[in-house]
Image (cartoon, grey):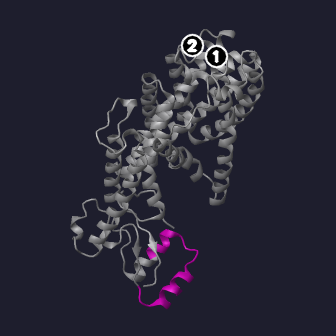
Amino acid sequence: MRDTKTSSAICFGFEPIFVPACNLLIKSIFPGGTLAVIIDLDTEISVIVSACIAVFYTLIGGLYSVAYTDVVQLICIFIGLWLSIPFAFTNPAVSDIGTTAVNGPNWLGSWDSTQTGTWIDSALLLIFGGIPWQVYFQRVLASDSAKHAQIMSFIASAGCIIMAIPSVLIGAIGASTDWNATAYDGDPIAKSQEGLILPIVLQYLTPVAVSVIGLGAVAAAVMSSADSSILSASSMFTRNVYNLAIRQSASKRELIWVMRAAVLCVGAVATVLALTINSVYELWFLSSDFVYVILFPQLLSVIYLDPNTYGSILAFTVGLLLRLGGGEETFGLKPFIPYPGGANFPYKTFSMVVSAATLILVSYGVKYLFESGKVPAKYDFLRCNLANGGRTIKLKVDDESKINAFENSDAHMSEDAFEKKIEAEFGMNLHEGQGNPCFETEIERTKL
């Protein structure tokens, strides 16, 4: 049993502050854009209204409101999008997507061999960068058992593929449409409205009844993603940053009010960003980018290895610098690290690998120095208790029969009671660093 909730608290604090905010603003644009298409409302007002609604019922209902509305909204989007596909396909203004895939406008695209490194980099980013998202672990950790969490994850993976098919088809339909033959004024691509192609296709290429169902489904489903991002951001900030790093003694009532304030703050920041940045795809890609480079190595190591705060902070810093060194067009940041091959070099994956290596080497190196006594325990300024094993304290007992009897007699004892009995039996202080966010004990029953 390895408890990972307090390890690398500072590094994991990055996600609730920045990444889910990006996630929220990305998804806030969608319901806002959908409202703009449905009722011809100004996009800025639509985004603000959508954000206010999501913040309001998340603030009032918490996880219950998010979970129950997600069920309804998922059903709505499944029915709404699949219902609209046949009607959009058969619209007279739409050409055969099989023909337009390879001929003009060639929506399928082509493989540029000179960009192979970038393609591989992006593929790995999208595969592994989607694992550490808090909105996913929020539901996994809320499951009543590990088996149900696994089942939910496998079903969700298949569901993602199924739910992505209508969006791909609608994108192909939008690229294959003669928009001059529709009631739409102009061409969405010429008007830089590619990000609204889904609601535009539903509005102008399907019957009114189908359009209302489809557009309502899109708006409802994406509001579901927005509220999940708000809740995950506020809960992670409250737990990982405020409770573990700022006020370990905070009461439950205080934490509830902090989380409510965090909901308002995250919603406000995300709304401002959504109003100032137009590219939904770039922001989604960018947030996955940072999760992949910075958080994926942290999550991987904290589950399967034994990292500590020293390695976590240094890995965070190194990964961030290497990633930003490749530049970022979204923020107008030019590259300042001359990677070989220029833009075709997979610098994102390189940054992730270096970050992971830094985390492992520094964590185990620092732990060795403290455990071996080469560095006195008094220099452990982050108070990770590395001189005593860090978050893993090994019981060194020579009498094997004694510890076997001890374990067998207390197989069903609670963790707190077990720790107290060990302290009394073996004269060990298992809570030397208790109350410090960098330290959490775990009893590793080892026969040495």
Q: Is residue 73 left or right of residue 9?
A: right
Residue count near mark 1 (Cα–Cα under 10 Å), binned few <14, some 14–19, many ≥20: some
Task: Locate residue 447, reporting x and y percent.
Answer: 46, 84
Question: Is residue 248 shown to the viewer in this render?
Answer: no
Q: Is residue 411 magenta?
A: yes
Screen quadrant of the C terminus = bottom left
Instruction: Check contact, mark 1 vs mark 2: CB within 8 A.
Output: yes
What is the number of the mark on residue 95? none
Task: Locate residue 308, reporting x and y percent.
Answer: 36, 61
Q: CA distance from mark 1 to mark 2?
A: 8 Å
Task: Locate residue 264, reporting x and y percent.
Answer: 45, 32
**Residue at image location 35% in from the left, 49% down from the top:** 319
For mark 2, what is the residue?
41
Q: Residue type at mark 2: give it.
A: Leu
**Residue at image location 21% in from the left, 67% down from the top:** 378
For mark 1, what is the residue?
38
Secondary structure character of the magenta stretch overall: helix
Q: Is residue 265 left or right of residue 109?
A: left
Task: Name above or below for residue 293 compared with residue 219.
Answer: below
Question: Is residue 124 shown to the viewer in this render?
Answer: yes
**Nearer-the-camera pick, 315 or 61:** 315
The residue range painted magenta reads: 397-420
Q: Quadrant of residue 385?
A: bottom left
Q: Residue type at mark 1: give it.
A: Ile
Q: Is residue 177 left or right of residue 338?
A: right
**Residue at image location 68% in from the left, 38% down from the top:** 163
